[in-house]
Image (cartoon, helix red, strand yellow):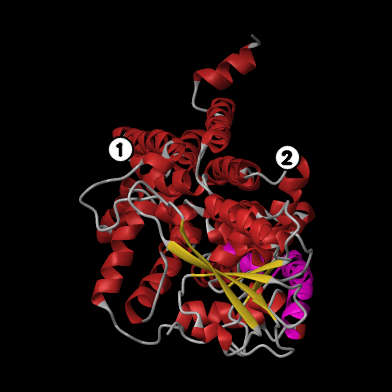
Amino acid sequence: MPNSLRRSFSVPGFGLCALIVAGLTLIRLIGLRYSVTDLYFDESQYWVWSREFAFGYFSKPPLLAWTIAIAEGICGSGEACIRSPSPVMHAGTALLVFGIARELYGERVAFWSSLVIAFGTGVVFSSRIISTDVPFIFLWSLALLAYLKLLRGPNLVWSLVLGLAIGFGLLAKYAMVYFLLCMALAAVFDERARSLVKRRATWLALALSALILAPNIAWNISNGFATYRHTATNVGGAGFRFSVKGFLAFFFSQFAVAGPIVFGGFLAAMARVRKLSLNANDILLLLFSLPIVALVMTAAFVSNAYPNWMAPALIAMTILVTALLVRENRLSWIAASIAIGAFAQLVLLVADANADRLTLTGLKKPDIYERTMGWRLLGEKVSALSQQSGAKSVAGERRYDVPSLIYYLRDRPWPVFTWKAGIAPRDHFELKFPLTGGAPEPVLLITTCPFEPRLKRQFGTVEPLGSFSVKTGPTTAPVYHAFKLTGLPRELAPAPACN
């Protein structure tokens, strides 16, 4: 082995880091192959989006759907393939974190920061599913690396990378706007950042990001600002409620999202910030994490916030905490963080492979995989009913059921529709696949409501086909009811209440 290569593996450098991350990614991909979990209905929804190329979708910008379409083109439409971009992109994020930390603190901090993020408990969980956070955090990390490179001096290539990362980051998740906020705050407190704002290359990057986002803006204009309205509802839809309980639930959830040592270390650092003698790079990382933490924590208290909303702060937070621990020679805490993540990874690998048999007695909902099990079985039972009844199409009422039926009936001849609950569409399926008088008859309606009279008010013939249960775990099996419908009116009224 050449001396240079031997040195790269004998000290904690990029070579050893990349090898560990690659091995971890391979294990995660194998785990997806042996997982017995069905697609969660959100994952099925994203897959449905990927069937139609667009610059926007009802509740999210388009990048995740494009990502799934690319993955499906490579390895097919199975659950493992649809989820495969997640561990791959998380590997990319870990290596980008290495680059960011090396830029700020050198190889040693870079090595440990990369492994801490790769084995972070939130990342361990996220690597098993496909969600908007996966490409979003990858692009956030790329943007931060490009930004740090530009702090050193003008560079057209890194300006273009920054513009691409911010632009596509906004197409992954609108929370990428936080990056612009952090850049603005950095310009207030950091001389290097203030100088960067004055350069033409920075404005070139921002112009490029705006150009990339423009088709999504145009899509929203032509679709009644669907995604923007949904995002606004998510952020402020709960109204002002000032919930201490909600705040505390969100606060403690961050020990799982960021990892107990990373989030605990960040809180400890904030508590003794005056004693730490933070340098300029430490403060820069604070400016790319603390404002997000403050904003989301405030939202959790006054309105509503989901645990993953803190995700963009995780990159700077992890690197800062790791740098402080290395500086104080507390590598045992770093090792503990990695060990916790490795243990969580092992537990989830085993649990995912046995999800259909796993139950924890004593919990309010002992079947902990209940929400991501039973969808395949639902598709199989609906397929059998459709064949037996001679149905030409299938309809559902719940947004949980419709995307799952579309996915698990993807190779079957029956189109799937949704019976709208109101005049205005509430989701992508009410917008794109509403049940109308033009649906092929007879229609097989799958519903959790057993009452036949509510259907006779609108349909010419209603034939009950009985009920069936769908096992979602060792102790749970929700009941569905099937009806064969003919004589659909030209204008179908919204689905009435279940009574």
Residue 193 image offset from top left, x and y in percent: 58, 64
Q: CA distance from mark 2 to mark 1?
A: 39 Å
What segment is highlighted magenta in the picture?
A: 192-221
Residue hosting label 1: 333
Label 2 residue SS: helix
How far from the left and from the top, in percent, is residue 271?
25, 60
Does the residue at mark 2 contact the one at mark 1 (Cβ under 8 Å)?
A: no
Magenta span includes 194: yes
Say which amino acid is labelled 1. Answer: Trp
The stretch drawn in magenta includes residue 333 = no
| Residue for point 51% across, 82% down | 233
Q: Position of residue 291 (x, y in %)?
A: 44, 69
Residue 215 lies in quadrant = bottom right
Q: Inspect this view and state whether residue 137 appears.
A: no
- Residue 18 lies, with reference to residue 240, above or below; the image says above
Identify the residue position indicated by label 2 in the image.
75
Quadrant containing the N terminus is top right
Secondary element type, mark 1? helix
